[in-house]
Image (cartoon, helix red, strand yellow):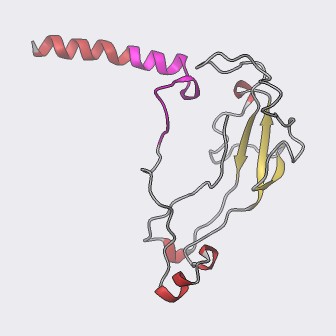
Amino acid sequence: MKKVSALALAMLFPCALLIAQVHPDYENPRVFERNQEQAHATLMPYPGSELALEGDRLSSPFHLTLNGSWQFHWAENPAQAPEEFYKPGFNRGEWETITVPANWQMEGKGYPLFRNVGLPHPLDPPNVPEQFNPTGSYYRSFELPEDWSKRQVFLHFEGVHSK
């Protein structure tokens, strides 16, 4: 019986890989998130109670804002978006600069989509449009303060929206 179970599992594994290759995560209703922390209250650490009681999270020495200039690439659909753009050595020389936080449509990329006008693409869940499905790729490098080397660090994207 153990051999039959192992054989059945061995046959299912390639099928799962094939499904994953045919349907990307953004078209898979079973994929809700990847590498995300469990839901919790967003808290900011402080070195002492006096600073914490001020109530300004930006005053914590353990807060680093990433607001500012980011490299940005706009594509008409995911197939035209650059793959592995986050890897060292990727040529982002032709990319534009965008201010973050921002709405890329208000920065001149694409055009705003208004909910009262209707969808600009057919509704066919879980499939996403192949022709027009604007996709933005953002890149920014930064260095953490040296005294954070032994600390647990979270990258928190506050207010990010994806359709």
User: Horizontal and vertical percent for residue 102?
Assistant: 78, 52
User: Magenta span covers which residues?
Assistant: 15-34
- In the current view of this chain or complex, which residue is farthest to the front? 116
User: Horizontal and vertical percent for residue 107?
Assistant: 87, 47
- Along the horizontal axis of the image, is 153 left or right of 105? left
Eyeballing the image, is 51 above or below 102? below
- Along the horizontal axis of the image, is 29 left or right of 4? right
Looking at the rendered structure, the number of numbered marks drawn on it comes to: 0
71 vs 94, nearest the viewer: 71
Residue drawn at 72 percent across, 18 percent down? 130
Residue drawn at 44 percent across, 51 percent down? 39
User: Horizontal and vertical percent for residue 67?
Assistant: 72, 62
- Along the horizontal axis of the image, is 114 left or right of 31? right
- In the current view of this chain or complex, which residue is farthest to the bottom? 50
User: Horizontal and vertical percent for residue 5?
Assistant: 18, 15
7 vs 26, nearest the viewer: 26
